[in-house]
Structure formats: C-alpha cells, structure tokens
Image: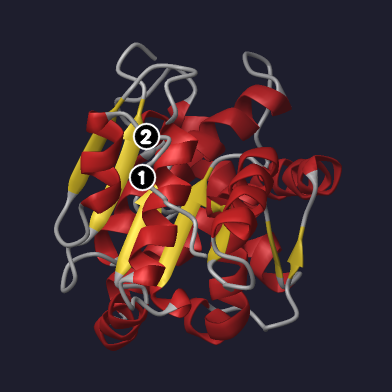
C-alpha cells in the first residue's frame, strides 16, 4: 500500500508539497519541517510521473544531503534523485565539461593547504610585499571575488578594500598557476560552473531541459555564484523551489 505522503503534514506544508510547476519560496524557521517538505514534495512529484533524473536537490552540507537522501529512500525507495551540495554538483558538472573552461577532465580539487602553497608561489611571482596583509587575508579576498563572479581579468583593484592593488596582482598569477597545474580550489568549482553556463548557451539549455525541477535548501546562504548557477538552470523551465529561514 502506498504511503500517504500528506498525512503527517499541516495545511501549509501540504500546499507546498502539492505545488509542482512554477517557482516557489518557502519561508520557515528551524525545526519547522523544511526538510520534510522538500523530501515529501520530491516523492509526490515522482508519483505524479516526473522522472528521477529531472529532479535536482541542492543544499550546503553533506550531512543535510545525506538526511534528505535517507528520508527520500523511506518515502520513495529506489528512486535515483540527485541530491548533494552545490560544490559536489559543480564538481560533477565540470568533470563532464572541463575542456570548456580550460581544464582537463582529471583536474585536481585542492585542499586549503595545497591552495595556500600555490598562493605563496603566486605572491612571489607577482613580486609583491605583504606588509599590510597576511596570505590568509589575501586568500579571503580572492575567495570573495570568485564567489561574486569577479574573474582575474575583471578584478581592477579599485573600490573593494585597502589591499585591492595587491589582490589585483596576485589573483591572476594564482589563477594561472591553478590552470597550469590542472587544478581548482573550492571556490573555482562555483566560478567555473557559473562561467560555463553563462558562456555556453547550448549547454545551458540542455542542462535546463534535463533538470526541470530544482530545489534549494537554506537558500538564504547562497552567494552570487550559486544564485547564478540555479538561475541559469531554471530559465526555460522556471520550476525553482527554495526554502529559507527569514531570520538568518
């Protein structure tokens, strides 16, 4: 006997679960059942005939993704819906289309220690003196640029902070070393994916058609790069549903 997906839901949750086509914003605080709504909604769409491959659920931590996956297996056993973090999704995307952003498909994803080593080499190459800023602060500035879709070519060193001139010299050198090493740092996963979708309209349309229904949990935590990615994937099929906490 099929599980009654609506039995344990309150009226507002039921309304969200039964909503299928078109955008939707779900605002709710901690402990209010946002994850329950997301997983029940996916299970409901599967019952309505939506193919598992057309569904994409994105969140911010592996723990949250594992929790959603576990709950969905109870509600809809055996359904291979892709659930994971933004960074994991982007890594998968780049493995398939790495050549379009100047990478080989076997590129490495650097941890913090390895990326800092490359950054130190870039600092030496750029011949800058770090008297007023630490390498960690420099790394944070580069991370900010990538998460805000500012490429090395676009970073002009003006108007963002007192060390912009240094960042403008080191950022391109650092990115060049990453590409030579066929490697990316954590922020590159987002930046490269956003650029990939922006500069390849044929691919964007194909992925939009594939991922017809997208769900994002904890949407209030998205940065500009993450927003650009989900926006690009929901233009032709604007079935983007997001959950967020208005108090965070």
Where is residue 183? Give x, y as percent. 72, 66
Task: Name which residue lies at 38% across and 70% down.
Answer: 47
Label ID, residue 187: none
Is 1 on the left-hand or right-hand side of 159? right
Q: Which residue is farthest front?
A: 1
Pick the quarter of the image with the C terminus.
Answer: top left
Q: Are marks 1 and 2 in contact (CB under 8 Å)?
A: yes
Of 225 and 71, nearer the camera is 71
- Residue shown at 56%/59% (left/top)? 83
Count residues near mark 2 (Cα–Cα under 10 Å), then give few for <14, some for 14-19, many for 20+: some
Q: How is the image coloured?
A: secondary structure
User: Where does label 2 land, which residue?
Assistant: 9
The crowd level at tag 1 (other Cα within 10 Å; few <14, some 14-19, many 20+) is some
Task: Left or right? Give the position of 2 relative to 110.
Answer: left
Helix, strand or loop at mark 1: loop
Query: Between 34 and 247, which is closer to the camera in this rendering?
Result: 34
* Residue 167 percent coordinates (x, y): 52, 35
Q: Is residue 149 visible?
A: no
Quarter where residue 46 is shown:
bottom left
What SS does tag 2 mark?
loop
According to the picture, the residue beneath numbered tag 1 turns out to be: 6
Residue 117: percent from left, percent from top? 83, 45
């Amino acid at each position: 006997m099929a599980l009654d997906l609506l039995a344990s839901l309150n009226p507002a949750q039921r309304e969200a679960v039964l909503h299928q086509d078109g955008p939707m914003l779900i605002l709710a605080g901690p402990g209010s059942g946002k994850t329950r709504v997301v997983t029940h909604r996916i299970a409901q769409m599967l019952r309505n005939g939506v193919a598992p491959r057309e569904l994409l659920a994105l969140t911010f931590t592996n723990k949250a993704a594992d929790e959603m996956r576990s709950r969905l297996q109870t509600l809809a056993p055996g359904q291979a819906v892709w659930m994971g973090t933004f960074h994991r999704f982007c890594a998968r995307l780049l493995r398939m289309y790495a050549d379009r952003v100047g990478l080989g498909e076997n590129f490495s994803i650097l941890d913090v220690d390895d990326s800092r080593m490359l950054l130190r080499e870039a600092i030496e190459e750029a011949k800058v003196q770090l008297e007023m800023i630490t390498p960690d602060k420099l790394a944070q500035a580069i991370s900010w640029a990538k998460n805000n879709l500012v490429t090395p070519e676009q970073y002009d060193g003006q108007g963002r902070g007192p060390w912009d001139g240094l960042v403008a010299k080191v950022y391109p050198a650092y990115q060049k070393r990453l590409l030579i090493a066929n490697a990316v740092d954590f922020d590159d996963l987002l930046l490269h994916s956003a650029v990939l979708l922006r500069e390849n309209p044929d691919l964007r349309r194909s992925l939009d058609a594939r991922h017809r229904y997208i769900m994002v949990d904890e949407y209030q935590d998205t940065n500009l790069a993450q927003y650009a990615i989900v926006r690009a994937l929901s233009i032709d099929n604007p079935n983007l549903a997001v959950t967020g906490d208005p108090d965070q």
